[in-house]
Image (cartoon, rainbow, N blue to C red):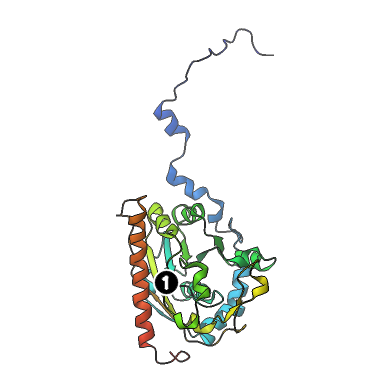
Amino acid sequence: MADRDEPEPETGVTVELRLEDRQRRLPAAADLREQLPGLEAERQVTDWGRSERVEGVVDRTLYDFLYHYWFRVEVDGIENVPADGGALLVANHAGAMPSDGAMIAKAMREEHPRRRAVQLATDSPFAGFPGLGMLVTKLGAVAAHPANLHRLLFDERQLVLAFPEGHRAQRKPLGQRYRLCPFDGVAFARAALRARVPIVPVAVLGAEEALPRFGSLAPLRRIAHLPLTTGLPLPAKFRIRFLEPVATDELEEDDDPGFVESLEGDIRALIQENLLELVAQRRSVWLG
């Protein structure tokens, strides 16, 4: 039973909390980042569902063979990727299956001095398939939602790989190889501006010949646009060029769509220019 001598609070009275009290009770914003469970070094599965064990097995049994012996990946400008802190990698997307994303992630583990991991921001229809969707998640795929991008880039300071062309890149005819599709919205540029992280454009050569798309399976179009392709990747020579980062920390976060679209257009033009240069330098699709 409550003490009768204790005065009851008066109705309509506002209790003020002094600023110094609030600062003493609440931890600083920067300290909260260290409390994220996904950053614990001893964990083998992150909050995003990424499994170090599964990723390690696939890397040793599949990615290593594809990277060194099948695609014979050649990497330029890997030093342009920051050694620490968040950064957004923006690449052209090509081929019926995402071999380009796997090879970019493998290049970061093989060639970069810090051997940094890469999270793949995707809206792939394969994520909804039983078994396959779980495997994609365990290998580092994350739904490309603005909140996810902000946490990965700003809070967890990770590398995120995005393909702004979206599904349209996988539906290009062979005659449109290495012609970038219009970027699907400006979510990636706005995410980088909000998180104050650099954008690293990436040009990938070879993926469109490795898994060319000849059409789609019409009976399954209502479920997903599954491509009709060779089934197994062809041994096309890969070249991955990491371009100089575009700093965003000195740019003001702007909700003006025109400003964000302009930034997106500049990055798209930069990737397109380097793709055409790589194609012009190539002597053979298979030998490089």
Can you identify the residue that label 1 sits on?
113
* Residue 131 left/right relative to 50: right
| Rendered position, 156 above or below 200 | above
Q: Position of residue 2 (x, y in %)?
A: 66, 13
| Rendered position, 137 above or below 14 | below
Q: For the view shown, which residue lies furthest in the left direction? A: 250
Task: Assign the C terminus to one quadrant of the image.
Answer: bottom left
Please name the amino acid that badge 1 sits on. Pro
Corner quadrant of residue 242: bottom left
Q: Position of residue 33 (x, y in %)?
A: 48, 49
Q: Is residue 9 visible?
A: yes
Name the residue located 39 percent from the left edge and 84 percent from the top edge. 279
Name the residue located 58 percent from the left edge and 75 percent from the top edge. 59
Q: Position of residue 84 (x, y in %)?
A: 41, 62
Q: Kindly state the secondary structure of the residue where label 1 is placed.
A: loop
Task: Assign the N terminus to one quadrant of the image.
Answer: top right
